[in-house]
Image (spheres, coloured by chain):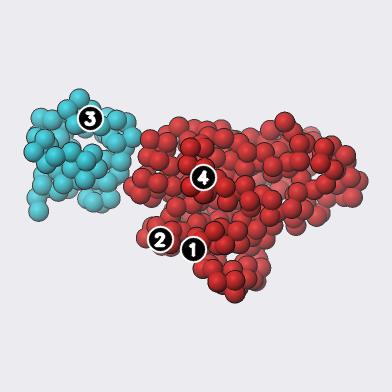
Chain colours: A red, B cyan
Amino acid sequence: MSTALITGGSRGIGAAVAKRLATDGFDVVLTYVSKPEAAAAVVEEIVAAGGKARALALDTGDSAAVTAFFAEHIKDADLHVLVNNAGITRDGLIVRMKDEDFAAVIRVNLIGAFACLREAAKIMMKRRAGRIINITSVVGQSGNAGQANYAAAKAGLIGLTKSAALELGPRNVTVNAVAPGFVETDMTAVLPDAVKASFADRIPLKRACAAGEIAAAVSYLASDDAAYVTGQVLGINGGMYM
Amino acid sequence: MSVAEKVKEIIVDQLGVDAAEVLPEAKFVDDLGADSLDLTELIMAMEEEFGVEISDEDAQTIQKVQDAISFIEKKKGE
């Protein structure tokens, strides 16, 4: 069976995507940075359910590490799907935001995704088939106060997605983005209750998104049914941005 | 296998053309039907096979089969 690589797969959306793609029949490789136990637990759950998975450490913000990672672990793995999911936040208002906070988020969320996409593209072009799915965010489309760095990185991912779709289309490699709205994960759990409530107010469906609902969108884009879909941004946001 | 033979093999493999068409004076774009993506893949395949680096500037000069062979022979000779 072909391989699906999910960056940042130890928790949140990444973990949900890893489990879903394993259920879909892919051999899953998930990467983690800070939570090896969480990543091992995801692998255990997938294996217990009869799937195939392994977890490997990778800081996608380290471009040389990404190149070495692909050469060592992915090159011979029949890579069909890449899900660029790894991401960090360093929230703060612009007037208080340090260069390092802006750069760190760009480095992991945008340059890291680019490095993984580049290495995956080399493999997928040769295979004459592949699916690249970038996890962007509704804030990359709408902007968000306190998240200038994150929103800029996520908007950048959308431009990357469309450019890659143009370049790789002739090799039967599709590139799409999934733009989640407000999803209940560790990343959003730290937000104050007032902020969460104000999000819910702005969502026509009046609830947060479950990580599994993002995984379902990724599953679709990775499937044969989505063979003619490329360069798209699929919003899974309860109607909070249209 | 000589450099010339290996280069021709890579061209046949990458461009899906008949070995008989891969003549020294054959142009990748005009004669062998390559597009820019094909050319990029060809350059990358040669880099991998011969363990050399081919800059974008150098790649621009490789337009015929013989250009590729000469370039690799020169690189390997350095």
Mark closer to the chain start, 4 or 2: 2
Q: How far apart are labels 3 and 2 at the CA level?
A: 31 Å
Residue at 66% from the left image edge and 49% from the top image edge: A214
Query: In the drawing, what numbered circle is on residue A146?
Result: none
Q: Are marks 3 and 4 in contact (CB under 8 Å)?
A: no
Report the mark closest to the observer, 1 or 4.
Answer: 4
Identify the residue under disc 2. Answer: A77
Nearest to the observer: residue A145 or residue A138? A138
Calculate the distance from the C-alpha at mark 1 to the C-alpha at mark 4: 19 Å
Q: Percent x, y for residue A96? A: 79, 39
Q: Is residue B34 visible?
A: yes
Could you tell whether B22 is left or right of A86 in the image? left
**At 81% from the left edge and 54% from the top edge, which residue is drawn?**
A190
What kind of residue is marked 4?
A: Asp
- Mark 3 sits on what residue? B33
Residue A200 pos. (x, y %): 85, 43
Q: Which mark is residue A27?
A: 1
Front residue of A217/B17: it is A217
